[in-house]
């Protein structure tokens, strides 16, 4: 009975196990891009057709965007419909997965155990609980149904469904090679190649379209930086699948280097050669099984190995198909042990189900997602930045500023970090919306060297926003001018310590800014640091008006120190110099 109706039990298990995801909201990890900010979803139901007309966000996944549009057209901000669809799609994939495995000769008991192990693995959470990743359960259902239909002897229907899966997520294209393998098993030779074209051609076309869309969207996309990356990523995935602990969502992938990668690769090539040699020998069953399993594990990883340009070389969601191969192997071993194996399967499934349920809570919103990631990997720059964004979205600007400052300690050169800090501070200080939501973002969109001119009207208003802009934003080559203006503004507000510090910084950046010297002297005079102020007034300058101002300031300092005769003389000299400069105009 269990063997006959096991797929329905797995369907029920999938529904129960991932039911917690239905209570989750939207995160700031691409969810707005695919829902509330999607040009298809925001257009309404007609946007579903538009999704087929052009790539979006560096990918061509029209069926995914069409489904998102149909689900969220009436209320794009409501997360429940999105989660409900992903939940049902994944459960349906689980329902048909044993039938799909039968296409590869996997026995019914092994298929049931393998499916159970696969669906309870914590790495499935990212594919089910993340709204922006709806393409995973949708394309998964297409691929699973395609193999199940192939096993039932319905190749045309299989090819149609597989093409729909490609339209949901083009990275399933390498799976078309398995249809070629299945056709080859039935009728080796040219006939198998011709009959498999119905799967291969759509996979090739949509795969090329997807790569081109990706490159066009991100022209500076990360390329493989060392030749060993594609050779080592499968081992990374293997290690993470066997031990699914530690950081998730964003991983710090370090390119292998040194002598040991070379030695391991030599060993790997030697083992592969031994397997291939074994294949050539008659009756070499285990080597052939091992080789086929290795290919089944590696082929789905091709788009994520580093061979193609991508932002994240490694991620949990990329293990959706390779982990199935490992589950089948483990399932076969457990089934061979009889009742002991069945008991071990139940224990293992129960153990994996616990982190699977808890991980779904991490995806409740952006704050919980990135808080968990920062806790697991405190040095992750992307996690820190996204946590700051989530906190800012919840109006927790002080907490957002804390995370951004921590990011600055990790990497002060992070692109746009100065703007993120300025935006968080604007929210924290509750500055006017016209500035915080309008002028400041506009400044951030400019190159640093262009910000100074755009900031001048804000500075001229003499409001609190001026200090914020000049204190936090990088102005490129004009940063000295910005600091000098901020110093003058702080002086007007009687913030003398700040005025002196900013003016000093301006002169360090550009010693020719002699008017900043005047600000320094005035600030020191107001702070009663008279000896320092008097020493600065002796600085040689080229601007006659600045020189005259310095004479007057030196007179004021001497007068404050009780040296009245010297002060009177210098004051007369300053007044005469300023009068002559005025007459000269």
Image: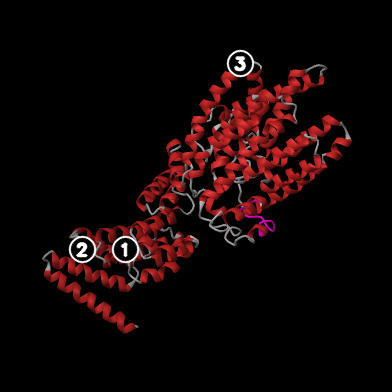
**Mark 1, secondary structure of its residue:** helix
Range of residues picked out in magenta: 50-60
The answer to whether 203 appears left or right of 378 in the picture is right
Instruction: Report how far apart the C-alphas of labels 1 and 2 lie in the structure.
Output: 15 Å
Q: Position of residue 508 (x, y in %)?
A: 36, 57
Instruction: Report how far apart the C-alphas of labels 3 and 2 lie in the structure.
Output: 89 Å
Q: Position of residue 209 (x, y in %)?
A: 72, 51
Residue 153 is a magenta residue:
no
Work out whether residue 304 or residue 513 is closer to the camera in this orientation and state it.
304
The answer to whether 279 appears left or right of 567 in the picture is right
Instruction: Report how far apart the C-alphas of labels 3 and 1 lie in the structure.
Output: 79 Å
Q: Tell me the residue at 24%/79% (across/down).
A: 576
Label ID, residue 525: 2
The answer to whether 293 appears left or right of 471 in the picture is right
Q: Which residue is mark 1?
A: 487
State which quarter of the image contains the N terminus.
top right
Q: Which residue is mark 3?
A: 339
* First-in-chain label (3 vs 1): 3
Crowding near pointer 3: few (<14 within 10 Å), some, many (20+)?
A: few
* First-in-chain label (1 vs 2): 1
């Amino acid at each position: 009975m269990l063997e006959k109706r096991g797929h329905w039990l797995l369907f029920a298990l999938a529904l129960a196990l991932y039911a917690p995801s239905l209570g989750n909201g939207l995160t700031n990890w691409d969810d707005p891009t695919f829902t509330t900010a999607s040009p298809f979803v925001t257009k309404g139901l007609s946007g579903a057709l538009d999704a087929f007309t052009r790539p979006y966000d560096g990918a061509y996944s029209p069926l995914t965007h069409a489904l998102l549009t149909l689900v969220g057209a009436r209320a794009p901000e409501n997360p429940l419909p999105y989660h409900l669809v992903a939940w049902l799609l994944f459960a349906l994939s689980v329902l048909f997965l044993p039938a799909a495995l039968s296409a590869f000769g996997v026995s019914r008991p092994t298929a049931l155990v393998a499916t159970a192990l696969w669906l309870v693995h914590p790495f499935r959470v990212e594919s089910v609980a993340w709204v922006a990743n709806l393409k995973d359960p949708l394309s998964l259902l297409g691929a699973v149904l395609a193999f199940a239909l192939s096993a039932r002897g319905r190749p045309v229907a299989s090819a149609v469904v597989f093409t729909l899966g490609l339209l949901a997520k083009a990275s399933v294209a390498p799976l078309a090679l398995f249809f070629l393998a299945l056709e080859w098993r039935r009728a080796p030779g040219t006939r198998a190649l011709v009959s498999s074209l119905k799967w291969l051609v759509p996979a090739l076309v949509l795969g090329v379209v997807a790569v081109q869309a990706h490159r066009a969207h991100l022209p500076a996309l990360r390329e493989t930086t060392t030749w060993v990356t594609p050779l080592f990523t499968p081992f990374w995935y293997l290690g993470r699948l066997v031990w699914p602990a530690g950081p998730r969502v964003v991983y710090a992938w370090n390119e292998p280097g040194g002598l040991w990668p070379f030695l391991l690769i030599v060993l790997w090539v030697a083992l592969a050669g031994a397997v291939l040699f074994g294949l050539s020998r008659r009756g070499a069953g285990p080597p052939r099984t091992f080789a086929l399993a290795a290919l089944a594990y590696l082929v789905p990883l091709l788009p994520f190995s580093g061979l193609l340009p991508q932002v994240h070389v490694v991620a949990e969601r990329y293990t959706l198909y390779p982990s199935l191969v490992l589950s089948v192997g483990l399932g076969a071993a457990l089934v061979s042990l009889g009742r002991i194996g069945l008991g071990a399967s139940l224990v293992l499934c129960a153990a994996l189900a616990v982190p699977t349920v808890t991980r779904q809570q991490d995806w409740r919103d952006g704050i919980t997602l990135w808080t968990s990631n920062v806790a697991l990997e405190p040095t992750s720059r992307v996690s820190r930045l996204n946590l700051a964004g989530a906190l800012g979205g919840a109006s927790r600007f002080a907490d957002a500023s804390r995370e951004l400052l921590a990011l600055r300690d990790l990497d002060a050169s992070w692109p746009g970090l100065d703007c993120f800090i300025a935006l968080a501070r604007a929210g924290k200080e509750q500055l006017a919306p016209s500035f915080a939501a309008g002028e400041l973002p506009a400044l951030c969109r400019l190159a640093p060297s262009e910000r100074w001119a755009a900031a001048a009207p804000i500075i001229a208003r003499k409001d609190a926003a001026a200090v914020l802009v000049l204190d936090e934003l990088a102005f490129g080559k004009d940063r000295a001018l910005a600091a000098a203006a901020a110093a003058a503004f702080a002086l007007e507000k009687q913030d003398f310590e700040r005025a002196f510090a900013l003016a000093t910084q301006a002169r360090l950046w550009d010693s020719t800014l002699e008017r900043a010297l005047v600000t320094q002297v005035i600030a020191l005079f107001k702070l009663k640091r008279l000896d320092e102020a008097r020493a600065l007034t002796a600085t040689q300058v080229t601007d006659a008006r600045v020189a005259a101002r310095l004479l007057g300031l030196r007179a004021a300092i001497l007068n404050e120190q009780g040296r009245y005769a010297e002060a009177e003389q210098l004051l007369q000299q300053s007044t005469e110099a300023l009068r002559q400069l005025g007459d000269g105009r």
